Amino acid sequence: MKKNIRNLISNVKKNGYGVLPGVLSKKYCGRVINKLEKILKILKKRKKYFGSNKNQVIYNYFYHDIKLINLVCNKYIDKVMTELIDEDYVLISPAARNPRLLDDKTAGKKTSGFGWHVDSRVIDKNNNSLLKPSINFFAIIALEDFTNYNAATKYIPNSHKFYKKPINRNQKIKFKNMTAETGSIIFLDTALWHSVGEPTKISRWSIFNMYGPWYMKPYYRFTDLLEKNKVKKLTKNAKKILHFYSIPPLNSEGVLTTLKKIKK
Ligand SMILES: [Fe+2]
């Protein structure tokens, strides 16, 4: 494993997150943003879910343009998730997000991410303790700079070591901003206490992909969501990440295992 990936993994373990800069070019990020703006327009026109005029959210963005699957399957994400989870890791939730204030009459609906929270699972409801160690991690792609002036994700340093869910989402606590340059990927432990920054008029498009182990249910049924002609365009690795090789057998009359190993 290359040294920068090794450093990144140790940063995720030590600090709850790590930044890999310069993964995607500014030009490519610009092209993705153009596509996302077009998808957003269509969603609004069709009165579909697009988040709100405070925080625009496009779930399953690759459903609208299958080429965007390249934001889910990337060789760097692959290396890091294989290390943090294992080689059978899968996608749990994909969303393009922009906490941006729009002068728009269509207010939209409530969005997730505001206030102090974790995205890991509580395993003991009596004391709000989380799975330890974490089994879910985000790869957050900064399609634009995350700065102190455009709602960079806020986090509480070292809070991933508590393995506890914050009780009060609106608690006033000392925090830091997760800054990153365009084209970087931020890898985040879902046990780290974090929140969306305060939305501004400055755009901050980003991709939030959460990954997990193959036996965890995804937020959406990707295997049914995509039409056959779109599935045909997927690589084996993309299909693995979208749960195509970890669907339980229908009954006990054939293969009895759920996980089907693929050769990369
Ligand atoms: Fe979150």
Image: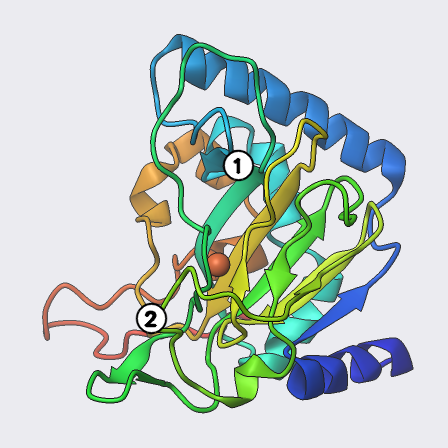
Disc 2 residue crowd, few under 14, some 14–19, many 20+, Cα 10 Å: some
- Displayed quadrant of residue 43: top left
Q: Residue at x 69, y 56 (%)?
A: 74
Image side of residue 220 versus residue 135, left or right:
left
Horizontal and vertical percent position of residue 264: 63, 68
Mark-to-mark CA distance, 1 and 2: 21 Å
Disc 1 residue crowd, few under 14, some 14–19, many 20+, Cα 10 Å: many
Q: Secondary structure at mark 2?
A: loop
Horizontal and vertical percent position of residue 18: 74, 72
Image side of residue 135 versus residue 258, left or right:
right
Q: Any atom of ligand 1 within 8 Å of the CB at mark 2?
A: no
203 over 46 or under it: above or below: below
Q: Amino acid at mark 2?
A: Met
Tag 1 residue: 62
**Would you say residue 245 is visible in this rendering?**
yes
Q: Nearer the viewer, residue 233 or 17?
A: 17
Q: Residue at x 58, y 37 (%)?
A: 99
Q: Amino acid at mark 1?
A: Phe
Q: Secondary structure at mark 1?
A: helix
